[in-house]
Image (cartoon, rainbow, N blue to C red):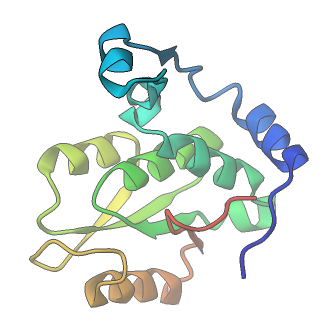
Amino acid sequence: MPVPVTLADIQAAAERIRPYAHRTPVLTCAGLDNMAGGRLFFKCENFQKVGAFKFRGACNAVLSMPEEEAVKGVATHSSGNHAAALALAARLRGIQAHIVMPHMAPEAKKAAVAGYGGNITSAGRRRWSGDHPTARCGSDMLKSNRRGHEYSQFQSTT
């Protein structure tokens, strides 16, 4: 069941990640405004650390963990941006990040995760989604080794 998120929760998360996250610009484009017949605003999260908005959620989740949980590290399964975001957030907190990535994940994504300090476990020989059996097996393996808290890119971080 989803946990209700309050304005205070959002404000606390913003304050928690402020020292770590970039303040990304909001841009407009008159040509696109004319084409759309209205005003469009673009939040440029491609300028965020790891190149994606996912860093904000991963950073908040990792920084919100109680110390007794954080020392165990974190784990997730992802083929890209969420993996990189969690690996960087874990490195900033000084804890380990165990990442299950599909064998066919782009090498650039694997290099980014490794560069941020993520411990990569390769799983499967085809692309998959987070609910693919390979992802669940990797997740179960991480849990059975007691390597820490598992974070899904789709779960609430408040």
The answer, for residue 94, to whether it is visible in the render is: no
Q: Position of residue 113 (x, y in %)?
A: 33, 48
Q: Quadrant of residue 34?
A: top left
The answer, for residue 156, to whether it is visible in the render is: yes
Q: Position of residue 18 (x, y in %)?
A: 71, 27
**102 vs 27, nearest the viewer:** 27
* Relative to 151, 48 lies left or right: left
Q: Specify the quadrant that holds the C terminus.
A: bottom right
Q: Position of residue 35 (x, y in %)?
A: 29, 22
x 80%, y 32%: residue:
15
* Relative to 158, 57 lies left or right: left
Q: Which residue is farthest front? A: 37
Q: Where is 67 relative to 28, above or below?
A: below
Q: Specify the quadrant that holds the N terminus.
A: bottom right
x 56%, y 44%: residue:
89
x 51%, y 69%: residue:
152
x 52%, y 66%: residue:
154
Q: Which residue is farthest top? A: 30
